[in-house]
Amino acid sequence: MSEAIKRAGEACTARGDLDALKEVTVGSGPEVTVGSGPEATATSYDYSNWETDIDAGSNLMSRIEGLAQEQLDAQARVEALEAQLAEAKVAVTVVKEHKLPNLLEEAQLGKSKVVTPGGIVITLKEAIRGSIPKGKEDAAHEWLETNGNGALIKRIVTIDFNKDQESWARKFMADCRKRKKPLNLKLVRGVHASTLRAFIKTSLADGVAIPLDVFGAYRQRFTNVKVKA
């Protein structure tokens, strides 16, 4: 309770003016009895644990508001820079993976490395992108096995246990061999994306016909540029 309210309450109590005393009571919360005597039953409430506004004219509030504004300004700068960075990355991708490779092809230079008159070194490269699409896993695995590359396929067996079967899960290996209890077994087959890309790249370089659509793969040309030292 502020000192001013306390003094006003004491004055009202001294006069026996309970109506006036009620006007200086504040809010709600833990009750505090004001005054004494049978008629001095008016109560006020303790706001000491509540959040309060700092005097807007105080130096402390000025400093707080200044730092809050500084944070807002910094956040705005970060958001603006992140937006600019995203735009710049898109611009790089468009030139690196489309415009420049296409123009080099149009020029028919027949080289993987070109040095411009201004001393910029351009290197044209190719990468294999993609992964096996959903719904084509069986076809992709069948092709690999038929063509002697089944070893690329990872086979993972998973078993589902209920949350109350911890002890049973800990005995998994022994129980699986003995088959004492039914198990919900799942066989998951798959080829790691990086392994698949490396395989396709090597196979294409060796002249092997690969069904790229089955593997969801495609050739991605791109350029690296730097200034000649």
Image (cartoon, rainbow, N blue to C red):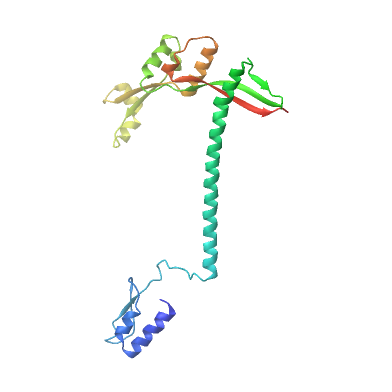
Q: Is residue 125 left or right of residue 170?
A: right
**Image coordinates for residue 177, horizontal then vertical, percent:** 33, 21
Q: Examine the rendered structure and indicate whether residue 115 appears above or below residue 37.
A: above
Residue under the image location 34 percent in, 25 percent down: 174
Residue placed farthest to the right in the image? 229
Q: Is residue 32 left or right of residue 223?
A: left
Residue under the image location 56 percent in, 21 percent down: 102
Q: Is residue 109 left or right of residue 146?
A: right
Q: Quadrant of the C terminus?
A: top right
**Image coordinates for residue 191, horizontal then vertical, percent:** 44, 21
**Image coordinates for residue 41, horizontal then vertical, percent:** 28, 82
Q: Nearer the viewer, residue 228 or 197?
A: 228
Residue under the image location 31 percent in, 87 percent down: 17
Residue under the image location 33 percent in, 83 percent down: 21
Q: Nearer the viewer, residue 185 or 218?
A: 218
Count the labels in the image: 0
Q: Examine the rendered structure and indicate whether residue 155 appears above or below residue 23.
A: above
Q: Quadrant of the N terminus?
A: bottom left
